[in-house]
Image: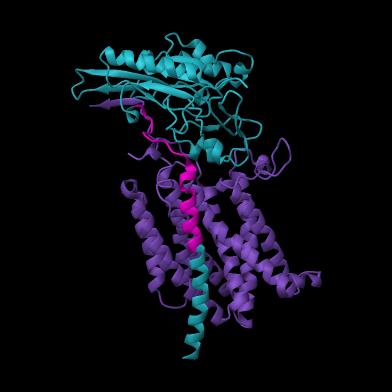
Amino acid sequence: MSDTFFTASPHWTWWIILYFFVGGIAGGAVMLATLLRLLGKPEDQPIARLGYYLGLGGAVLSGLLLTIDLGRPLRFWHMLLQSHTGLPMFKAWAPMSVGVWGLMLFGGFTLLAAAGAAAEEGWLPWPRLRVLGEGALGRGIDLLASLFGLFLAGYTGVLLAVSNRPIWADSNWLGILFLFSAASTAAAALLLLATRTGHGAAAGTAWLAQFDRGALVLELLALIAFVISLGQVARVLIGAWGALLLLGVVGLGILTPLVLPEPHGRAARLVLIGGFLLRAVVLLASAPIHTEGSGVTLQ
Amino acid sequence: MPEPMGFYTDTTVCIGCKACEVACKEWNQLPAANGGRRELSGDSYDNTRRLDGIHWRHVKFIEQFGEDRSGGRWLMMSDVCKHCVRAACLEVCPTGAIIRTEFDTVVIQADVCNGCRMCIAACPFGVIDINQASGTAQKCTLCYDRLQAGMVPACAQACPTQSIQFGPIRELKQRAQRRVKQLHVLGEPRARLYGADESMLGGLNSFYLIADEPEVYGLPRDPKLPTRNLFTSATLSTVGAALVALLGVVSFRKRRMDQRV
């Protein structure tokens, strides 16, 4: 029996599952937007701007989800400032501490990038904010936002690994798995958003679909590596959670979108469902495991 | 600075009276479970079942029986926070609520904790949980308030068999080693100490004398710090981030080639 089986569940359920999903999409969307800005064509730019809006919305929602999940939501700031001294609270070796700062900085740079994009579209009463999306300043903001976006997409898996819970701490592959899944779900979400709002120049959505297929392949490889790395612990997945992982995440969320023909909308929706199920399985499959020792044992 | 203080729990003399549980609840003003309604476990004489936010001491009853129930034995163990010298909960706490005291014990400051529950997932022993009354993570404080007043922790004072002993760690370890030798001579070769040496998380300042394998008592054989996974996990994720960026660049190339055809 793995030593992780003697630990207790932190009761991270739907708010956190939703956060892992939304945070991944937000981080991935900003990274995709920056790629479109730096390497794309002029007709890709509407999708790039959508990416920054999606990232900003996701960052705000992430903060809200994390706050309402706390036992004492009004003390959320204790993770940013030491409540006794008012000095910054930061632990480089504690993923949750780094994650809170990463999310804050991601939100900040994404706000600047989104403001630049909105000013470019003439939506804001301050046209001078256009500079936030232009030139070296704009590129710097975009790159920093994407860097923290990539961090946000992956640190959640690292946070789970830096614990002592079954499944989570029994593998080192959750971070990279969540990161690939964030890339695939972000491309899917951005593709859907672009199609729905009519911003999708065909070349841009085709690129997103192309990227998504690559991300899904990477995700599948990481998922296989993750299950193998669990070793004996993988046995706890035998049952409903394993079935959901195999049929829902792999079958519905990865393999089906890979073989579905155009248009990309249906595939994108399945990718989103698969990404959500992946996080649900990883969090909920671990939750009931707890070996207490107390009780009757027959020998 | 006072010297490191802690518990030595000799499970071989525990009689399962649960006086420690009651004393702990009384002193720390912890509420009853289920609003005071009696709820029986149904498969054990132990009805507490586990440590959590309102049970900081829990006397485990390990009821070992043969298939036909003709023979068997009871093991009893008053479980509590291990006050690890290298504490997983303290390591990962993002608010700084968890501190090491002048007595080398580990305490969660109730006015700082915001209930994120990272420590619950990190503790290798499953000791911590949320106290619904406060919304914060709670566990044994090793009666930090009593220690500051020069008193003995409530559980140790209430224990009628000296199964729970409180004192300077150095003295407790010597006493425990003598007791193991005595038990070996008396014909209990399975007697051993759990967490008394530094190889286990730097030493547990609440360590145990047990009479079977650790797993039998619901104790991990080799508890580890959560950060053991940090470097590999973070490195793999960084490689993943580079691959995702590379995938983006490659996808643009592919699009250019496709359009040229």
Taking A244 as reference, is B143 above or below it? Answer: above
Look at the image and tell me whether residue B46 can be seen: no
Which is more toward the observer, A212 or A264? Answer: A212
* Residue A225, percent from left and from top: 37, 58
What colour scheme governs how the chains and residues are painted in the rendered image of this protein?
by chain
| Residue B16 in the figure: left or right of residue A63 | left
* Residue B107, percent from left and from top: 58, 28
- Tell me where residue B188 sits by quadrant: top left
Q: Which chain wears cyan?
A: B
* Residue A37, percent from left and from top: 63, 75
Taking B195 as reference, is A173 above or below it? Answer: below
| Residue A219 in the figure: left or right of residue B62 | right
Q: At 57% across and 57% down in the image, what residue appears?
A: A152
Which is more toward the observer, B59 or B150? Answer: B150
Q: At 60% across and 71% down in the image, what residue appears?
A: A33
Look at the image and tell me whether residue A263 can be seen: yes
Q: At 40% across and 17% down in the image, what residue appears?
A: B176
Per the rendered image, the range of residues in magenta is B217-240
- Tell me where residue A85 sits by quadrant: top right
- Tell me where residue B61 sits by quadrant: top left
Q: Which chain wears purple?
A: A
Q: Residue B226: within the magenta?
A: yes
Q: Quadrant of the C terminus of chain A?
A: top left
* Residue B89, percent from left and from top: 53, 36
Please tell me how many numbered marks the rendered image carries.
Answer: 0
Q: Residue B111: within the magenta?
A: no
Taking A228 as reference, is A76 above or below it? Answer: above
Q: Main secondary structure of the magenta part?
A: helix
